[in-house]
Amino acid sequence: MTPAALKALILAQSDGSPIRLAYTRGDAECAAALNEPGEYPVVTPMRVGDFANWLAERGLLRKVHAAQSHGNEQIASAALLLMLKIQGDPSRMVDPADVSIQGMFAAFVAAALVSAGDVTAFTTACTGVGSFAESHLGKTVSANDIANARVA
């Protein structure tokens, strides 16, 4: 995110909000406030082992496995790719923000292998809480980021 975009994001918060108030303080204090653990939704990757368990619990693992022989080559390939992903190292991550994962789920929804509700449930399962910076920027911010935003 550019310094100007960071500044706009901060200034878009309502007057009196903790984020707007933090912006009136020094750069380090502002960065600390934006990085402070809070109640902001943060979507994080899920471990492959947990993802395989999640698929099994929802009855989707068998469907995806069977879809490897689907008549539509795109669906069959997506199913094969997903099975290869979950058969690998169980500590690797499956990121709901990954375009390939989103594409697979979209293809599976189109083929009626999974429902839109299943996709939402996956994203929900990957959602926790974190800081304003993690939620809105996907990373922490530094005092230098704040200083650059102020002059943008």
Image (cartoon, rainbow, N blue to C red):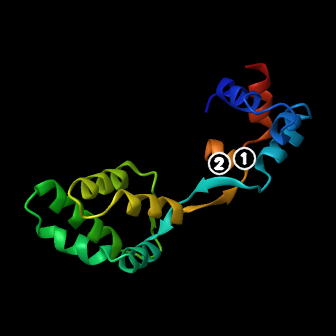
Residue most extreme to the right? 25
Q: Which image quadrant for residue 83?
A: bottom left
Above or below, comparing residue 61 to residue 137 in the picture: below
> Does the rendering let one see residue 46?
yes
Q: What residue did someone put label 2 on? A: 135
Q: Residues within 10 Å of mark 1 (few under 14, many from 20)?
A: many
SS category of the residue bearing label 1 = helix
Identified at 30% across, 52% down, the residue is 106
Q: What residue did someone put label 1 on? A: 132
Residue most extreme to the top? 152
Please, what is the three-letter code of the amino acid marked with disc 1?
Answer: Phe
SS category of the residue bearing label 2 = helix
Identified at 45% across, 58% down, the residue is 120
Residue 94 image position (x, y, % from top left) = 43, 63
User: Does 9 sit left or right of 83 as displayed?
Assistant: right
Q: Residues within 10 Å of mark 2 (few under 14, many from 20)?
A: many
Identified at 52% across, 66% down, the residue is 125
Alpha carbons under labels 1 and 2: distance apart: 5 Å
Identified at 73% across, 42% down, the residue is 141
Residue 29 image position (x, y, % from top left) = 89, 42
Above or below, comparing residue 45 to residue 40 in the picture: below
Q: Are marks 1 and 2 in contact (CB under 8 Å)?
A: yes
Please, what is the three-letter code of the amino acid marked with disc 2?
Answer: Ser
